Image (tube, coloured by chain):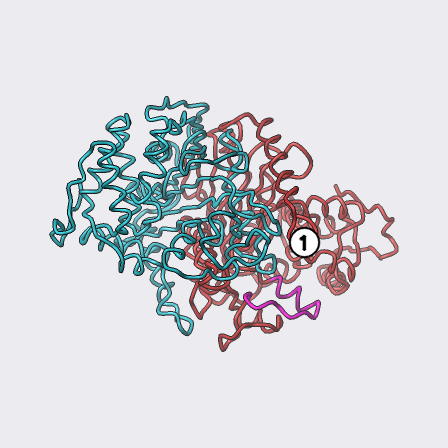
Chain colours: A red, B cyan
Amino acid sequence: MTSSAVHAAAIRVPESVLRAFTESAFRALNVPADDAVTAANTLIEADLRGIGSHGVARLDRFYLRPLELGLINPRPRWIVRAETPSTASIDADGGLGLSVGARAMDLAIAKARESGSGWVTVANSRHFGAAGVYATRALGHDMIGIGMTNTGPIVLPAGGAEARLGSNPIAVAAPTADGSPFLFDAATSVVSAGTFDTYHRQGKRVPIGWGLTDDLQPLRDPARGPGGRRILPLGSDLEHSAHKGYGLAMIVDILCGVLSGMGPGLAIAGAGQAGGYQSAHFFGALRIDAFTDPAAFRQTMTDYLSALRGTPPLPGVEAVRAPGDIEAATIHENRTRGIPLYPDSVENLRSVAQRLNVRFDWEPGDNDGDGGTGT
Amino acid sequence: MTSSAVHAAAIRVPESVLRAFTESAFRALNVPADDAVTAANTLIEADLRGIGSHGVARLDRFYLRPLELGLINPRPRWIVRAETPSTASIDADGGLGLSVGARAMDLAIAKARESGSGWVTVANSRHFGAAGVYATRALGHDMIGIGMTNTGPIVLPAGGAEARLGSNPIAVAAPTADGSPFLFDAATSVVSAGTFDTYHRQGKRVPIGWGLTDDLQPLRDPARGPGGRRILPLGSDLEHSAHKGYGLAMIVDILCGVLSGMGPGLAIAGAGQAGGYQSAHFFGALRIDAFTDPAAFRQTMTDYLSALRGTPPLPGVEAVRAPGDIEAATIHENRTRGIPLYPDSVENLRSVAQRLNVRFDWEPGDNDGDGGTGT
């Protein structure tokens, strides 16, 4: 995990400041007020959990610029292409993935309330941010939440020399009896594209087994990664079951791209502007009381995560963590102290404020130490 | 893949012979005729696909012996603990996983026909064989099929020194327009326990990154593997995202063990007799026409798999394969030439025949070359 390295160089900006600014920026680009609130929330929730690679640092490049270029439709027509008691197939009309995704996840939750489970595909959307944020929307409803998206081709099939798969993340969230839910949110590639950027920022070489160069040698220089985009699937090589990461990426592509009717990620040609390319999603919600007693489920989950945290660690490993532990610790810290941003990200937000004529009237000295809790 | 190595040493027995024998063996141990047919089918379907590690070679040790010892209930009472239009929670009363699993998967398919999707948990079952066999039951209904199971602890959490997770496989099947469906069926550990046995049989050392010894060194001797049971999760080490294989194993455990109300795999104490320990499963079916046109889906799938097979391979790699390709080729070969079994497995079946007083009246010379196609 790289959160401590991020914090060392970071400026902490209160959640409330970033939330209000992000909403204003979307509204300034003709996004309706309710969608602007929802979209800002998706980015801020990622930042609060320490997933800074999918937060407001990407606001301009992944969402505002594509809106300005007409690659994202600010006022999409939401089309239900097919529907059953437990499923829906949505065409998002090129809308902002950050709000489209939340609305689709909430539809899955509503269907689960009626029918025990809900499953929603979304075609013709755009970059939706962090998959885990959608999965966690189910937690307050005593449901297990699932979120996935396909992306354009940046990952090699197992044994292949050309990228034909997206990083295709899978997120699953499940409630517990304490404040630390289970949250799995991971690309099906060995690492996400953003991790190469983080290593580049930190001046570090990447380990062998993460990617290949254009001449198919082990990639060590992270700066060469995002150009070539030959990231390896989870497993890294055939001897360590890269066919499993490859197959998992395909499952995501089938549920998102093929089942939605849009097509798999490799059909997304000329991605061009970051965030402005086509994307398809898959959301799911399972009502826990449709299977077992929710209170017993939550307690068993807490005991289960505790048992795993209690595993004796390997030499050199501080402690075994449960998926979601870092996020739960980070959300508390970031709510209290503010969301950490690199100085260049803060500068970028200031330039956005000027360009769109919206207010970003905050200076490092304004941070009163306990930050804002947002509204 | 190890199928060619298996074939070199193997005796081929016609599918019809093995199917009739397996049914008779189950019936001899008080399993009702319809369950015996279903359970035999689950094993034979695994063998036909080349998953010999989960086929009739395990009949005696994983299923017949536990039946004789009273660890598997031959005539379970099927209890529906909870039900909604798209879900069901089953208690399998200690029944034979091979037939319980098929019945539960068919219930998921029936619910999907009515409600768009169907999701079934099964508590208090026993070893169910190959997850992929259940997922493929959805294909003929133009559905995507999903099968999972938890197992007792043999896999290390990421960064941990003690096994607390099962091999917890995930299987997903989706139809195509040709005879080669998408079929993903993989343990969430870097390799399954059976792969260590295969390497041991072949006198090969296992690669670094598959498991650890009791003193936490890289395991190279596969014979030492099954004792210690310190298999690594997919990703192998923290630097190559072993936390992802670990998290995926937990997702399977949550959906199977916790959601079913039975509890996670680490609670399965004293597994003792192979196949006789508790197990919980999760099955799912998604009706394709609830989302998109099934004919278009199948054609897109065929094009998608073709595009992936057409990826230029890395040096030293013959070709990029799609998940399910080996199974599709093997099923044709094994239907035609017979199912390959090691000589000691055939000897074991003969001893079973004698012990249970059922017929296994087949000799290598009886194989007429085109085998049986079964009934």
Frontmost residue, B158 versus A265: B158
- A306 up-or-down from B330: above or below: above
A52 sits left or right of A85 in the view: right
Residue labelled with disc 1: A317
SS at badge 1: loop
Magenta residue check for A286: no
Q: Is residue A35 visible?
A: yes
Frontmost residue, B327 versus A121: B327
Q: Chain of mark 1?
A: A
Q: Residue at x 72, y 63 (%)?
A: A355
B209 sits left or right of B316 in the view: right
On the image, the x and y values in percent for residue A13 come to 79, 53
Of the 4 image quadrants, the one containing the N terminus of chain A is bottom right
Magenta residue check for A204: yes
Q: Is residue A96 visible?
A: no
Q: Residue at x 51, y 63 (%)?
A: A236
On the image, the x and y values in percent for residue A231 come to 52, 65
- B137 up-or-down from B295: above or below: above
Total labels drawn: 1
Kind of residue sitting beneath label 1: Val
Frontmost residue, B16 versus B201: B201
- B261 up-or-down from B209: above or below: above
Q: Bounds of the magenta span?
A: A194-210
Of the 4 image quadrants, the one containing the C terminus of chain A is top right
On the image, the x and y values in percent for residue B285 come to 38, 39
